[in-house]
Image (cartoon, rainbow, N blue to C red):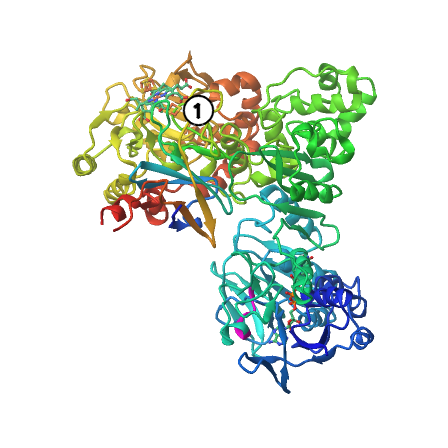
Amino acid sequence: MSWIDIADIEDIPLRGARVLKTAMGCVAVFRTGEAEVFATADRCPHKGGPLSDGIVHGHKVTCPLHNWVFDLNTGQAQGEEGSIATFPVRVEGGRILIDGTAVGRRSAA
Amino acid sequence: MSKKLVVVGAGMASGRMLEHLFAADPDAYDVTLFNAEPRGNYNRLMLSPVLSGEKTYEQIVTHDDDWYAANKVTTRFGEKVTGIDRDRKVVIGDKGEVAYDKLVIATGSNPFIIPLPGHDLPGVIAYRDLEDTEAMIALGARPGARAVVIGGGLLGLEAAAGMAARGVDVTVVHIMGHLMERQLDESAGFLLRRSLMEKGITVLCGANSEEIVAGPDGRAAALRLDDGTELPCDLLVMAVGIRPSVALAKEAGLAVGRGVHVDDQMVTSDADILALGECVEHNGALFGLVAPLYDQAKVLAHTLTGTADAFVNKEVSTKLKVTGCDLFSAGDFADAANREDIVFRDPSRGVYKRLVIEGDRLIGAVMYGDTADGAWFYSLIKDRTDIAEMRETLIFGPAYQGGAAADPLSAVAALPLDAEICGCNGICKGTIVDAIAGGATDLGAVRAKTKASASCGTCTGLVEQVLQLQLGDSFKMPAAQPVCACTDHTHEDVRRLIKVKELKSQPAVWQELGWKTPNGCHVCRPAVNFYLLADWPLEYADDPQSRFVNERKHANIQKDGTFSVMPRMWGGITTPDELRAIADAADKYNVPTVKVTGGQRIDLLGVRGEDLPAIWADLNRAGMVSGHAYSKGLRTVKTCVGSDHCRFGTQDSTGLGIKLEKVLWGSWTPHKVKLGVSGCPRNCAEATCKDVGIVCVDSGYQVGVAGAAGMDVKETERLANATTEEEAIELTIAFIQLYRENAKYLDRPYKWVAKVGLDWVKERVVDDLDSRRALVERFEISQSVYRKDPWAQHVATERKRYAPLADLTLEAAE
Ligand code: SRM
Ligand SMILES: Cc1cc2nc3c(=O)[nH]c(=O)nc-3n(C[C@H](O)[C@H](O)[C@H](O)COP(=O)(O)OP(=O)(O)OC[C@H]3O[C@@H](n4cnc5c(N)ncnc54)[C@H](O)[C@@H]3O)c2cc1C
Ligand code: SF4
Ligand code: FES
């Protein structure tokens, strides 16, 4: 793993999300608690809804287009066939760090 | 001959270490113990009970002179160690050097002081040692003394509660949204805050300190917050965190990160120097609680006496030592895979418990109000016990395996007898209880006897719950539809309980009404958010995260994830300048579709989310504001040309429509609200199928309500005839405010009126002039907050929320 510092925790409102652009496409970064974050693919497997625009509750997000509900831990949709990719992310000293390898960041060299 | 051991720091960790050392081998070392404080080892944790007056200093001393003498410890208390000469193997104290064979650094940590202007004034203290404690105790002896505590964590709250117990007027200023955010979630934070307020402590959350202001005597006299609030104080206590005390080790050239680096045997980068306690860093971890320090003490003593041992960092648990605030927290709530929450709430006892489970293991536990099972949960966490078998009943604790689920009736059971249940008729719980005792055993009988729930009917669920509580199994509860799986309450119950129990925040609702999830779901959160802002417009702050994306981003999301932008066109009137600005915006932002809507305005469809603030700023500059085409709020007021141009027009329908739109815009409602004003009964503005539709006639204005032309089609019903424009406007506002205060979330007015009856509405809006006026007044209070253009607000303050958090593709390309 290679942890990359992407933002301050306060850049995401509590129970909100923001989009991170990566080589793997858009990643949604969710803040579920004062110092708790998750990262998943931003695209809903149903019809492409932007999950970062969904309502965040517990460790779940509801897709804004047709209300599929995803578990942010596993990426699994609740009661539906479908799942989203999840990425390692953590908070340290108020900063959000994401695993650069997982989101496909090539090294600068 | 014994070897020479020098210990720097006589704190919690070194005291325990010396006990282990002498137990293992009393003669191995000649010990010299330095302490900067002018005293020996005492139990620092117990400073809080000393502060609150529950203990004396003498009672918390752990090692006294006799003990040091018996163990032949040379004590150099009140003497600070200023340097270590590793080449000569001596430590340098204020009063001279001491040679060592082995050296132990146990210097603890220093309180962190935020470098606010004024932080170095006299009267600003931390909370770490006996001197600090004595300063706070002295304050309690002064009548009318005031204190401000910065920091709502463990230490800050213990300082606040201790001073309050001594009669000091205390305000706690906390930067985060709720207290002890590292240990607690919001609901437990809400309960804690309430208990502290009951002790007379003022708690300000989300408060940012800006400056400590000096008084004429040069001492700290007030804390100023960034919103300008000044909190006067005689003493200011900063309890915002600690930093390992590493200066000594660093100067001596030892390896130091955030703390003094030690290995599993507690040895630093110098084989003859060991360290333990809050000053060390072990595998990247720092320490702030004593439990792991006691483990370190044992390991360090073993290392000194040549016994193999290794320190392992385990989960810690926390308790708040404030009488009357039973709080326990252990383990981990931070991110990890495959987690599940179990929440238990007993609002009547003020109890909250939450367990975090990962796979078949318990990994975290928080409890408030009833912490009896804390130790049991803590042991399950520490031992990584497989809890698969107990999963269902785990939350009830060891004594209650196989117990019952949370009682949905508890919120109603907890209401006092004088709590109002039926707001329309002013009937309180006691009256209903009496009626039931007097033989009214079903809803109809209670209604007949007390009038409770006989009017608008929103309290029906509550009356039924009182029946159920009084009659038990002999009353059969009709199956009412709860809001969602998070609660057993209906929308009507939730609305009523928010009012009678004066619940003013979402955590308050979740806790007091026994929500079964930590923080609701996409169904209940928007409803609760609306109910709170409708009932407490000045006290409750709207929560964008509890809104559907359209209302959070003030634009309608499209099927491809782009948005539509629709500025207001007051009453359907526009100007060439506005049209030019719309055309320019459409060009500038490559808007694929420009459409005239069914609501008499122009929709720009297909705008990229990131462009929203910019396009709004352009439209704002041309004098346009959000059309709220996305909101459960006022949408459009459709008008016809009216008497200004039309040969049949009886009144200025366009003018009235514009006036209505200007008073009503920005207001949030249970569902969307659309109006129409037609200039004559030919009804070109289709007013007779709107939520409120006004048809102008020669004698005035026919105000109709509860029409529909969506999934259902229904003609409006006549609310009243008004003779003046002002009266028509007042009737409209009063009707909409009554709807805002009473309807279920997502009921359009026609559905709500069908439930409560038009007569009930007329009584309040038409017949009773005081009630009408009060409704209009309450609407105006709410509009003082909400009649603002959200586009302009977001352009000014929320712009960055629309941009990506970061763009890693750019860095990769470099
Ligand atoms: C743009 C517009 C259609 C148009 O091109 O003309 C429109 C577009 C939408 N309507 Fe509408 N309605 C529009 C006028 C109407 C009208 C006619 C009117 O207002 O005179 C009606 C019937 C009257 C009424 O309100 O009932 C109407 C009844 C609905 C309904 C059914 C509501 C009901 O209670 O039965 C929905 C669904 C809902 O709200 O739950 C709906 C929902 C929608 C949504 C918001 C669907 C959605 O959730 O995404 C559409 C958004 C499209 C977008 O992305 O912008 N729209 N919609 C009209 C905007 C009017 C405006 O200027 O604000
Ligand atoms: C009010 C209060 C309440 C607390 N409550 C709890 C609780 O309920 N539960 C819990 O687990 N923890 C609690 N803690 C934290 C706990 O007290 C600490 O984790 C613990 O005391 C740390 O032990 P230590 O030996 O590392 O440091 P300390 O106990 O701070 O001892 C370090 C000593 O070293 C001395 N020193 C420092 N530098 C030098 C030097 N250069 N020369 C000579 N001497 C020096 C200092 O004067 C100090 O006396 C509380 C702390 C406070 C202040
Ligand atoms: S009628 Fe249906 S398809 Fe057309 S805008 Fe309204 S909601 Fe969308
Ligand atoms: S696109 Fe997400 S639920 Fe349909």
Measured as percent of width and height from the top left, residue B531 is found at 54, 33
**B23 or B442: nearer the viewer:** B23
Relative to B461, A68 lies left or right: left
Task: Determine the image quadrant of residue B386.
Answer: top right
Which residues are the magenta region? B243-248
The answer to whether residue B370 is seen in the rendering is no
Image position of B180 with respect to B80: above or below? above
The answer to whether residue B729 is seen in the rendering is yes
Task: Determine the image quadrant of residue B302.
Answer: bottom right
Measured as percent of width and height from the top left, residue B34 is found at 67, 77
Residue A107 falls inside the magenta stretch:
no
Where is mark 1, residue-wise? A68
Relative to B459, B712 lies left or right: left
Relative to B86, B579 lies left or right: left
**B43 or A67: nearer the viewer:** B43
Residue B246 falls inside the magenta stretch:
yes
SS for callout 1: loop
Pointer 1 indicates a residue of which chain? A
Task: Determine the image quadrant of residue B482.
Answer: top right
Quadrant of the displayed image that contains ligand 2: bottom right
Q: Is mark 1 within 8 Å of ligand 4?
A: yes
Point out the image quarter for the N terminus of chain B: bottom right
Which amino acid type is marked by label 1? Trp
**B461 or B445: nearer the viewer:** B461
Measured as percent of width and height from the top left, residue B350 is found at 70, 40
**B94 or B611: nearer the viewer:** B94
Q: How many numbered marks have been drawn onto this rendered protein structure?
A: 1
The residue drawn where x is 69% and y is 34% is: B395
